[in-house]
Amino acid sequence: MKGGALLYSPSMKLATMDIGSGTVRVMLCEQRNGSFDRLVVKRTITRLADGFAAGRLAETSMDRTVQAAKEMAKEARAFGAVEIRVSCSGVMRRAENAKEFLMRLRDEAGLDPVLIAGDLEAAISSLGATLELGFADQPFVLLDIGGFSTELAAIVAGKAETSVSVDVGSVSMRADYLHEDPPTDKQLAACAERVGQELRAAVRIEDLGDHGPLVGTAGSITNLAAMSLKMERYEPGRLNRAVLTVENVQELLSLLISMPAAGRLSLPGLEKGREDTIVAGAIIALEVMKLLQVERMLVTEGGVLEGLAVYAQWPPDEGGLLTV
């Protein structure tokens, strides 16, 4: 895979878009010399995975997601973006009608989406996290918790030396196990057991354990960090290099499960729309830290959006599962 190289070109306006199981995100930036200036980042929770059954995305979920992508694409063009790079992941990898969804993104939003494999998602995220943290020479292990999958990668010099995608996510685990509001102790235990089993089956500790600190990115992690910091308003600058300990996450999980989902919206730092999935996200974070035997995790805003802005070639030569 050519995932580690950076794109070198004159300054240009660029938009990147990440369409996942729960959220559509867009970044507007000026890209230059293998880096970029982030100007605008927006996200909308669309719950593409809601109603996923018999291997198919639900029509209403696709409608919401396509509409959000259409609005973001319109804003990107008004900004003057010469290119809009769109990656899709998560539940779409398991959907029989993924091609239909990509065609709708093309026909209704004027986009050229690429459904990417888990190892490519890890490679792209690794670039974004490396740039955001300034870890050019610092190896680290990257954790990216998505709605339907979780990616772990050993990063060295901005490249994913080893990566694995595990079929557990905050949306899928909530749907499969956390049926009560708030969930019961039995449901929580079953969820944690499933996550632990999937991680142990997929992850070779020796490939990840000696690669520096654990770094977490994406919505579940950044929301947990924002809650730990009791942020009344979202401040990305405070999140970069924030630290979450096992004790922090355990305390947050205890707080979250002490109330129904609607009550969680009163907690500073929790984004509206994540109130029912954040419990599963916290469980996944704890199980990863347990597996890797670490007590603390650095947090970064850098991930797929930022990695797309500097990825060597788009659409990619390798790791693209489906295009239209």
Image (spheres, rainbow, N blue to C red):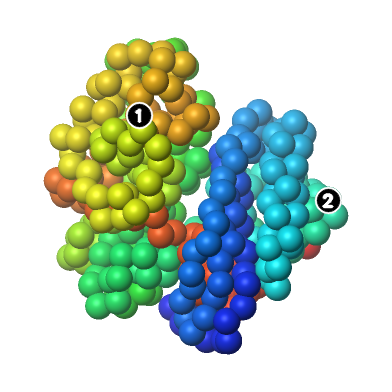
Q: What element carries label 1?
A: loop
CA gap between label 2 and label 1 equals 37 Å
Residue position marked by numbered label 2 in the rendering: 108
- Residue drawn at the location 71% of the way across and 36% of the way down: 64
Q: Which of marks 2 and 1 is in front?
A: 1
Locate residue 64 relative to residue 217 in the image: left or right. Answer: right
- Which residue shows up at 24% across the image and 70% down it? 139
Residue 296 rendering spot, x and y as whole percentages: 17, 48
Along the line of sight, the residue nearer the viewer: 55 or 215 = 215
**Which percent across, then down, holds residue 186?**
32, 15
**Element on which disc 2 rests:** helix
Task: Point out residue 17 in the picture as x, y percentages from the top left corner.
Answer: 61, 57
Position of residue 286 in the picture relative to residue 116 (left or right): left
Q: Can residue 114 be seen in this view?
A: no
Q: Residue at x 46, y 16 (%)?
A: 262
Q: Determine crowd level at label 1: few under 14, some 14-19, many 20+ residues with C-alpha closer than 10 A.
A: some
For this view, does 3 lie left or right of residue 195?
right
Kindly identify the amino acid type of the residue bearing the numbered disc 1: Pro
- In this view of the protein, which residue sits in the foreground, 298 or 198? 298
Nearer the N terminus, badge 2 or badge 1? 2
